[in-house]
Image: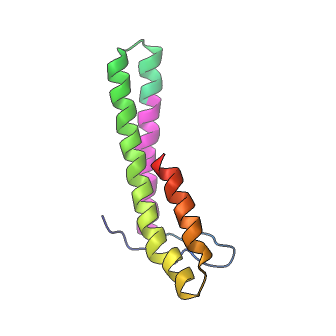
Amino acid sequence: MMIPMASCCSAGRKSHHSPTVKRNLTSRLNRIEGQIRGIKRLIEEDTYCDNVLNQIAAVQAALSSVATILMENHMKSCVMERLQAGDQEVVDELMQTMKRLMK
């Protein structure tokens, strides 16, 4: 899903997501937060482990989706801008981030 983005590479390397991206990510994170509370409740209620594990898998997939959106926007804005400015260090930074996400 392509989401319109604003530049995230201003002074101090702070992200500046468009209002559309912020709303999308916030909505997704709110749902994930609710899912986490639901998992906690399932554990407190001694729900069958397989059902809890299925809910955990759903949360992991939802977090992966958030990370994918952030990564796409980061690569198309921050990384692109820094490469165009001649900053090759951004490639090493991106590789480290991708390694952490792939664990």
The residue closer to the viewer here, 60 or 91, is 91
Residue 44 at x, y percent in the picture: 47, 15
Residue 26 at x, y percent in the picture: 46, 54
83, above or below 31, in the image: below
- Residue in the picture at 53% in, 51% down: 100
Q: Is residue 36 highlighted in magenta? A: yes
Taking the view exactly as shown, the residue that stands out farthest to the left is 1
Quarter containing the N terminus:
bottom left
The residue closer to the viewer here, 94 or 25, is 94
Q: Report if residue 6 is visible in the image.
A: no
Taking the view exactly as shown, the residue that stands out farthest to the top is 46
Residue 101 at x, y percent in the picture: 49, 51
Residue 98 at x, y percent in the picture: 49, 58
- Residue in the picture at 50% in, 69% down: 17
Side (left or right) of 100 relative to 21: right
- Residue in the picture at 47% in, 39% down: 33
Taking the view exactly as shown, the residue that stands out farthest to the right is 12
The quadrant holding residue 89 is bottom right
Which residues fall within the magenta stretch? 19-37
45, above or below 77, in the image: above
Instruction: Identify the main secondary structure in magenta.
Output: helix
The quadrant holding residue 68 is bottom left
Side (left or right) of 57 relative to 6: left
16, above or below 62, in the image: below
Q: Is residue 28 highlighted in magenta? A: yes
Q: Report if residue 94 is visible in the image.
A: yes
56, above or below 90, in the image: above
The residue closer to the viewer here, 85 or 39, is 85
